[in-house]
Each structure stands twice: as structure tokens, then as C-alpha cells.
Amino acid sequence: MYSLNFLHKADDEDPQFQGFFNIPVDNLFGRPLLMRYIMSRIPDYKGAVVVSPDAGGAKRATKIADALGMDFALIHKVLSLFLQVIDGRNVD
């Protein structure tokens, strides 16, 4: 049997996550590393756009965009259920 003595978690969205463990939890943030990468590797990065793939990542993406003076965009995903229509009624 294995035991865990310490947990490293990357970009924890919920600080209450640490409360579920009875061991030390270290939250590692990727934002500073990503921002340095953008500034050093993307020419004319201020003309680029930071895009969040969904509403859940919008807050993190806007923090990066604002800090770097970049524009921000959000992809709006719509999940739809496949419904068969039989005799004018929806059937799941």
C-alpha cells in the first residue's frame, strides 16, 4: 500500500480544495511561467488575443490578457442533446 505525504497541485481553481486532505498541499501557479513564455517567444504579442475555451477559464485568461495588455476572447460552447422526433414528440 502506498501513502501520500505531500501533494503538489497546479493552478487550483478552488482554494478550498486543500481542506479535503490531511497532508500539506502546495498550489503551483502556471500563470507567471506562461506570461514569461508569451513575452519572450511571441513577437508582437500585444497584437495577439488570449482565448478562453469556455466560461470556466475566462477569469484566468482575462488575468493574463490584462497583465500583458492583450485582447481577450471567449468561445461560447453549446452542448445539445440528440433528440429523436417521433410523431411530433421528443424522445430521449
Image (cartoon, helix red, strand yellow):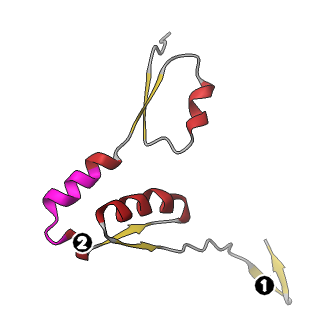
- The image quadrant of residue 73 is bottom left
Residue 76 image position (x, y, % from top left) = 53, 74
Closer-to-camera residue (68/57): 68
- The image quadrant of residue 78 is bottom right
Amino acid at circle 1? Val
Q: In this view, does 14 lie above or below 35?
A: above
**Residue at 49% across, 12% down:** 3
**Which residue in the protein does label 1 denote?**
85
N-term mark: 2 or 1: 2
**Residue at 47% across, 12% down:** 2
Q: Are marks 2 and 1 in contact (CB under 8 Å)?
A: no
Residue 8 image position (x, y, % from top left) = 41, 28
**Which residue in the protein does label 2 denote?**
46
**Residue at 39% across, 69% down:** 51
Amino acid at circle 2? Lys
Q: The C terminus is located in which quarter?
A: bottom right
- The question of residue 28 being in magenta is answered with no
Q: Which of marks 2 and 1 is in front?
A: 2
Residue numbers of the magenta segment: 34-44
